[in-house]
Image (cartoon, rainbow, N blue to C red):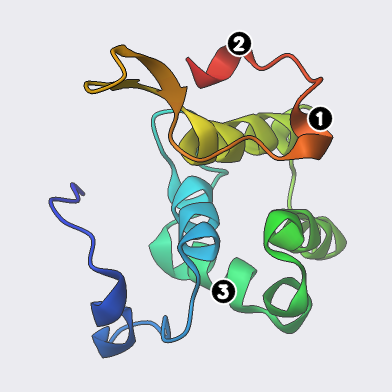
Amino acid sequence: GYGDEYRQKLLGACETMNLGGWEPERLTQMCIFAGCDYLKSLNSMGPNKAHQCIFNSAANRAPIDECYVKALAKLRMEGMAIPPDYEESFRRAFLTFQHQRIYHPIEKKLVTLKPIPDHLKDEEMPYIG
């Protein structure tokens, strides 16, 4: 599908999935699981299964930047075949959505969408643009 508009305050009104109270980062991870420009979805992974992966108790309680790690661990335990490089590819896709470079028209330069956290500052991230 195609997303035309995202309104955080309306997530709780979704009738097909429980998205109430979800942070934007958790929703981003669900969308990456379902398939995005930066990472192809796993076999048989659509929006509903992606929601279940992030909503499961361990991933839902995990720190935001670890939800997908917990979800992948659960999928592995359930016997799903996950390519060896998938977790790192997922991490890169997530970091790209969080920190992609954009043009700031007032400063007339490239900036990141969100500031890069200190623990990532020394990491080279050419994939964010």
- Binning the other alpha carbons within 10 Å of mark 2 as few (below 14), some (14 to 19) or many (20 upward) gives few
Q: Residue at x 31, y 71 (%)?
A: 8
Query: Helix or strand or loop: what does disc 1 sit on?
Result: loop
The answer for how far apart the CA atoms under marks 2 and 3 are is: 31 Å
Q: Which mark is residue 52?
A: 3
* Residue 70: quarter of image: bottom right
Q: Position of residue 13 (x, y in %)?
A: 25, 88
The image shows residue 31 at horizontal and vertical percentages of 44, 53
- Please tell me which of labels 2 and 3 falls first in the chain: 3
- The secondary element bearing badge 3 is classed as helix
- Callout 1: 10 Å neighbours few (<14), some, many (20+)? few
Provide the residue designation for mark 1: 84
Q: Position of residue 100 (x, y in %)?
A: 46, 28
- Against 51, residue 19 (above or below) is below
Label 3: how many residues lie within 10 Å, few (<14), some (14-19) or many (20+)?
some
Residue 126's label in the rendered image is 2
Sequence-first tag of 1 and 2 = 1
Q: Amino acid at mark 3?
A: Gln
The Cα atoms of the two marked residues, 3 and 1, are separated by 22 Å
Q: From what the image shows, is residue 26 above or below residue 37?
A: below
Determine the residue positioned at 47% across, 54% down.
28
What residue type is disc 2 on?
A: Pro
